[in-house]
Amino acid sequence: MNSHTTTVKPGLMQWLTSDTPQSRFQAKCGRTWLGWLKLTENKLAMIGLSIVMGLILVTIFAPLLAPYDPLAADLANRIQPPGAEHWFGTDQLGRDILSRLIYGAQYTLLIVGLVAITAAPVGLLVGTAAGFFGGWVDAVLMRVTDIFLAFPKLILALAFVSALGPGIENAILAIAITAWPPYARIARAETITVRKSDYIDAARLQGVSNRGLIIGHIMPMCVSSLVVRVTLDMAGMILIAAGLGFLGLGAQPPMPEWGAMVSDGRQFLLDQWWVSTVPGIAIFVVSLGFNLLGDGLRDVLDPRGGD
Amino acid sequence: MNAMIDISKLNAWFDDNHVLKDVDISVPANGSFGLVGESGSGKSTVLRTVTGLVDDWEGNILVNNKELTGTRDKAFYRLAQMVFQDPFGSLHPRHTIDRILTEPVNIHGLGNSDARVVEALNQVGLDNSFRFRYPHQLSGGQRQRVAIARALILEPKILLLDEPTSALDVSIQAEVLNLLTRLRHDLGLTYIMVSHDLAVVAHMCDDIAIMNHGRIVERATATQLAEGKLDHPYSQQLYKAAAGYDRAVVDSFVDWD
Amino acid sequence: MSNEPLLSVKNLAITFSTPKGPVNAVRGVSFDLGRERLGIVGESGSGKSQTGRAILGLTAPNGKITADQMQFHDLDLRNLTPRAWRKVRGARISMIMQDPKYSLNPVMTIGDQIIEAYREHHKVNAKEAKRRAIEMLESVKIRDPERVFNAYPHEVSGGMGQRVMIAMMLIPDPEILIADEPTSALDVTVQLQVMAILDDLVRERGMALVFISHDLQLVSSFCDRVLVMYQGLVVEEIRASELDQAKHPYTKGLLNCLPKMDGNHAELPVLTREASWAEA
C-alpha cells in the first residue's frame, strides 16, 4: 500500500485523497483513485488487467509488432514448426502464425467491445424498466428475457448466424442478441433492491420523474454489477466467437480470427500441433485475463462493499 | 388561525393490513405537531400517506386549504418536504452532495442553483467544503443536515420529520434539534414530527398525539406531557419507560399486541 | 460481588490499517471486570464496540491489538490460537449482538436452533433437549414457548428474537456476557423488558455483564459501574449511582444535551468538544 503512495507526487496525492474536494471533477477523480488503489491490492486482478492491456496494445501496434504479413502465403514454408524464423511456426499456407495471432487480436477486441456496448445498455434498460415499474411491464419484459435465456447461448447464436449469413459482423450481432438477457436479469434484481430505499423515495418527493429516477438514480446503482458481469462474460463471448469461427460461421478466410485459426489447424492436430494449439492458448489466456479482471472489479465496484 | 395541515378520518392499508384507523390531525401554520408511538404504530405511515408514498388510503387531507387527491403534483412538493429517519439510507450513495442539492432546483426550474446550494448548506450549518463530497465521506449528523438542506432548498412551508434524530448520537441529536427549532422560527415552517422518543417530541412540539396500532390513543399538549398528565394506560406505560430502567416499573408493563 | 476480577484488561490498544492510513480505534483502555454489570458508554466511533469485540477475539483482520494485560482467569487472551479462542468464545465469554435478525438462521425453526446449540454442549437425547429448550425459552420470559419453539425467526418480533438469542447464549453457562447495544433496535418498553431479563440472569447466575451502549442515561439506570469512552479513551469511570456527580465535561455534556420532558422548548445545551479530551 505504502509503496504506491510514495511513488506519486505528494501534491497530486493530496488532491486525489482530499476529504474536501473543490469540484465535481475532483470528487469523481478521488473516488476513482480509491477504487484503483483497491484494485491494485488484488494481484490476480492486476494480472488480468495486464493481459487485457496487452491485448489492446497488440491491437494498436499490430503493424509494428508483426514480423510478417498475416495474409501472405508462402507455400514453400508450409507448416513449419516453431523456430527462430517463425516463432510459432507457420500454417498450411505458409503464413506466419505469430503475425496472424497479432493481427487477430483486433477481431477479438472488436467482438468483445461491440457486444459489450450493444448488449449491456439494452439489458440495463430492459431490466431497470421491468424492476422499476413492476406489474405487467415486468411480466412482459421478463417473459421475453426468459425466452432468450431458455436456449443455450451458442445454439441461439448459431441459429441467428445461419439466418443472417456467415461473417464477422453477423457473428457479433448474433452474440449481442444472445448476451443481453442475463444483464436484464441482473439489472432487474438490483433495481428491485434499491427501488424501495429511502433515497429513491426522497428523490420522488423532490419531484423527480420516473424517467429521471431510472436514469439518474437507479441505473448508477446497477452499473457496477453490470460492468463486473460483462467483464466476466467477455471470456464467454470470445469463446462463442471462436466457436462460430471454428464452425466457419464467423470470420471468413483469410481473416486471421483466432477461432477460425484453431479450426484451420485441426486436420494437422496430431502431427503439427502448433497450428491449432497456439491460437487456442491465445484464446485461453485472453479469456482468463478478462475473467480475473472481472473478479477484481467485483470487489472494487460492489455497491454494498466499502462505503 | 387557519390550519396548515388538516387530516381527518385518515385510513390506510398495506395489502390487507389496516395500518391507519381514523386518524385526525390538525396543525396550525408555524405549528409543530408530534406523533409518538412504537414500531408498527403507524406513525410514519401518516407522513408517508401525506407525501404520496402510500397508495391505498381513504379520508381527507387538506394541506394549505387544498384537498389532496390520488397523485401529488410538483407544486405540492414545493409546499411540503420530508426528512427521513436514516441519514445513511436517504442520500444516494453515488451522488455528491452538490448533485443531491442541485437536482431539485433544476427539476422545479428555480434557477441560480449555485447560490441556492451554498445558501441551503449555510442554513444547516455546513460550509462550502462539503459541497463536492460523497455521502460516505460525511458523519451521520452531517448527512442528516444535508437531508434537511435538501428538504429546504425548495423553500417549503411544511417539513415532515420522520424520526430525524433517532439514528444520531445524543450530542448530535441536540445540535440537529436546535437547528430544526431555529429553522422553524426563522423560516416560519410548520412541522409534523414523528418519534418513538417522548422527550424529543415533548421538547420539539406544542401538540402531541400518541399512537398505537394505527389509532391515536391519546392527545396532549407539551405542558400536559411534561406534567405526566396522561390518561390512557398505554401512554402512561410509554411515559414510565422513558424514565430509564427500573425493575419494578418493568414488571408492571403490559403487552399491547 | 467478589473483589477478584474475572477479567483484567490493561492498556488495551487497537489500531486498524486502512487505505487512508492507520486508525487508532482504542487507545490504552484499562479495566477490571468482577461479577457485576459494567456499562461502556460512548458515541459512535468512541471505540466501545471494538473494546467489546477485542475481549472476544473478534477484531477484524486488519486490526492490531496490543495490551499490557488481558487476563481471563489463568488465560492470557493476548496470544490465544484460533483453536483456543473457540473454546473460550461462546462457551465462557459470550456476546449478544445488536440485531437478532442477522444472528439467527432464517431457514431453521427457533427450537431446532436452540436444540442444536444445546446438544453441542450437552450429551442428551432429542426429547430431553427439547424439554430443556422450552425451559430456556421460559427462563427468558417468553409466555408462549411452544409457539416460539416451532416458529421461524422472521415470524417473531425483534424483542422476541433478542430473547431467543439471550436464551441461546446462556446454554453453555458463560461467565461473562458482552451485550453490544442489545436493545437499541427495540421499542422502549421491549428494551426495558429485555434488560430486566438480563438483570435477573446476572443476579441468579452470578455472571458478569458488559453492557455496551450509546445511551448514558439508560446504562446508568441499569449498571453498577460505567466507563465513558471518547475517541478511544476512557475519559471517566464512575459508579452509576453517582452519575450526577460526574466530573469530566464530556460526561456532563452528554447528560445535559438530552431533551427533557419539562415542556421547555428552549435551545438544548450543545456539547463543545475540546481537543484536550482526546489527548491520551
Image: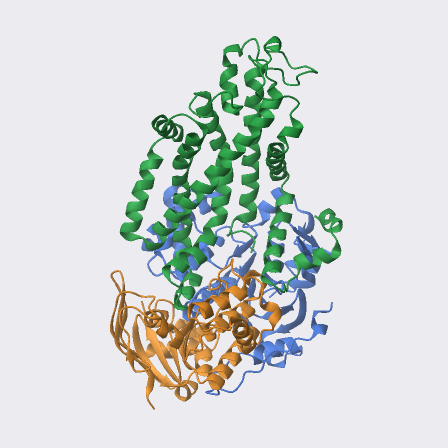
Chain colours: A green, B orange, C blue
Image quarter of the N terminus of chain C = bottom right
**Quarter of the view holding residue A81:** top right
Against C9, residue B249 (above or below) is below
Front position in the image: B138 or C115: B138
The answer to whether residue C184 is seen in the rendering is yes
Q: Position of residue C94 (x, y in %)?
A: 54, 54
Residue C242 in view:
no
Q: Is residue A247 left or right of residue B17?
A: right
Residue C166 in the image: state x and y as whole percent: 46, 57
**Where does the C terminus of chain C fall, quadrant-wise?**
bottom right
Q: Please state which of residues B211 and C168 is positioned toward the viewer in this rendering.
A: B211
Q: Which residue is more in the foreground, C224 or B148? A: B148
Left or right side of B117 for C149: left
Provide residue A162's location: percent of width, then percent of height.
Answer: 36, 25
Quarter of the figure with residue C73:
bottom right
Vertical placement of residue C158 versus B160, above or below: above
Q: Which residue is found at the position 37% from the left and 59% from the top? A: A210
Q: In the drawing, does residue A191 fall left or right of residue A73?
A: left
Q: Residue furthest bottom?
A: B1
Residue C67 placed where, x, y %?
72, 56
